[in-house]
Amino acid sequence: MTHVWGVSKAADRVWAQVSGLPRAEGANRLLMTYQIFLDDSGDDQVFVLAGYVSTVDRWAALSEQWENALHGSSRYRELKRFKMKEMTAQLERVEGFYRIIEQHVTAAVSYEIEVPVLVEVVRNFNWPAYFGNREILENPYFMAFRSMIRGLAYHHEKLSIEPPVDFYCDDQTEKKRIYEVWDTVKWNLTPGGQAFIRGDPRFEKDEDFKPLQAADLYAWWVRKWRREPIRRTQGEAPYHFPWEIKRKIPTLKLIDDKAHLIRNFENMSTMPLTIIPPR
């Protein structure tokens, strides 16, 4: 596949990231490089990290269509960027953005945790004396990235994802808190988990990288589903957008409740946790 530079600035920004290649090389190769774009949503009660995975060429196509959708029409005003929290009164227009996501992404992934439960379990767990500094475990980003990488590495074939994967986060997210845990997460992964990721997460502005705006849409909805009282059927909370689903996107939902955390910590406590100093 050949990409023509300059057709869309939004698409160009995605192509320019391809494996760090110069533009001319990145444009003339068919590279099945997978990228995951993530955004967080939450407060001191609930933390969500969510987004989508797809290939570079599909992200570029999404970016071009997304940019066109932002320009607006006779019905809608032009948007500088898409922020789901600002679009709650325009769900019909939000559906149009979701249709672009539905067309181009390979898989969806989300992680949810109640922050007070995490802190409680970490502080009350019967840790062995040799176990390292446990404060890092109270950072929800540690549990989120650890669970997300392990889950994607284990289920990647079912999700039709080929590793390694580049991680992208919104530049407005808590970069410091991610860098506090990222190296420790990588160091303590299994070989399969370490092979799944490529390099460090990259932080970009969502105005420049439209896939981050798609991640914002998904993270907002996952948090909404988590916070609202939901009637449960057979123990599962139905996660439904308020529009028809025309293509079922392979989805990995990761939820750490108290029981899951205790089991995780029981497994982790059998060996020392190597803490890498924050950058």
Image (cartoon, rainbow, N blue to C red):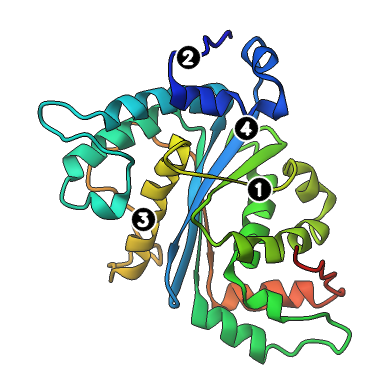
Describe the element under mark 3 as helix, strand or loop.
Answer: helix
User: Mark 1 or mark 4, which is nearer the start of the sequence?
Assistant: 4
Q: Is residue 58 visible?
A: no
Q: Which residue is mark 1?
A: 201
Query: Residue 73 appears at what percent x and percent y?
Result: 16, 26
Query: Label 1 crowding class (10 Å Cα cut-off): few <14, some 14-19, many 20+?
Result: some
Q: Looking at the image, is mark 4 or mark 2 earlier in the sequence?
A: 2
Which numbered dot is residue 34? 4
- The residue pinned by badge 2 equals 6
Give the number of the mark in front: 4 or 1: 1
> Sequence-wise, which precedes: disc 1 or disc 3?
1
Disc 2 vs disc 1: which is toward the camera? 2
Q: Earlier in the sequence, mark 3 or mark 2?
A: 2
User: Which residue in the protein does label 3 denote?
Assistant: 220
Image quarter in which the N terminus is found: top right
- How would you rate the neighbour count of disc 2 (Cα within 10 Å): few for under 14, some for 14-19, many for 20 or more? few
